[in-house]
Image: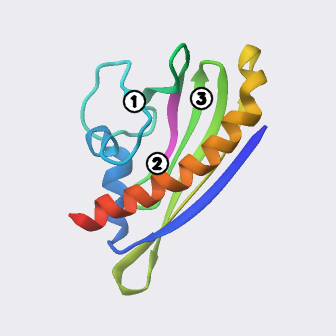
Amino acid sequence: MLRYSSSVTVNRPPEQVFEYLVDPARQSEWSDVPMSRPDGGTGPLAKGSRMLVTFGMGPMKAKVGLEIIDLVPAKRMAWRSYSGPIRWDGAYELEASGSGGTTLSQEGTLAFTGLWRAIEPIAGAEMRQGEVKELEKLKAVVESK
């Protein structure tokens, strides 16, 4: 099982940062993981919303279904996988920091199943680096607006 955690301070209030987590159109501005809504839904995600994310490159791609299991506006968004070869539990936590900023933290666990277990060590190293880079990209995008 892989564990990850990282955080970044964004010089914007929690409400503004949160919009980039729950709006799929805005999420695509900072995340390299393609996401779609299997129900064809539009607009911000809510508790119970489902999405499909795709990991990997070339022929090694995994589609993982995620469900939002907890959502507190401007405070928290948590998800759990419901399908695919990766069991994933994760969350974003937002906390107001001094001068109107936000400390955005993320943490989670991933367990690879089936043949995907063979690439878990490689994927784990890549994911840990990628998660930090995504938060840095999110910070840059939000602060540029």
Whether pointer 1 and pointer 2 mark residues with C-beta atoms closer than 8 Å, the reply is no
Of circles 3 and 1, the one toward us is 1
Was residue 15 drawn as part of the magenta stretch in this picture? no
Kindly identify the amino acid type of the residue bearing the numbered disc 3.
Ser
| Image quadrant in which the C terminus is located | bottom left
Closer to us: 84 or 141: 141
Secondary structure mostly seen in magenta is: strand
**Mark 2 Cα shell of 10 Å, populated few (<14), some (14-19), many (≥20):** some
Report the number of numbered marks: 3
Q: Earlier in the sequence, mark 2 or mark 3?
A: 2
Amino acid type, label 1 = Met
Q: Amino acid at mark 2?
A: Leu
Mark 3–mark 1 Cα distance, whole angstroms, equals 13 Å
The residue tagged 1 is: 35
Q: Which residue is mark 2?
A: 71
Name the residue that disc number 3 marks: 81
Image spot of residue 86 (x, y percent): 65, 26
Magenta segment range? 66-71
- Other residues around mark 3 within 10 Å, as few (<14) / some (14–19) / many (≥20): many
Mark 1 or 2, nearer chain start = 1
State whether residue 37 is above or below residue 70.
above
93 displayed left or right of 33: right
Question: Which of label 1 and label 2 is nearer to you?
Answer: 1
Here the colouring is rainbow
Q: CA distance from mark 2 to mark 3?
A: 15 Å
69 in the magenta segment: yes
Tag 3's secondary structure? Answer: strand
Residue occupying image coordinates x 32% and y 72%: 12
Residue 137 at x, y percent in the picture: 39, 56
Q: In percent of the image, x 60 and y 50: which residue is there?
A: 129
Secondary structure type for disc 2: strand
- Disc on the earlier residue, 3 or 1: 1
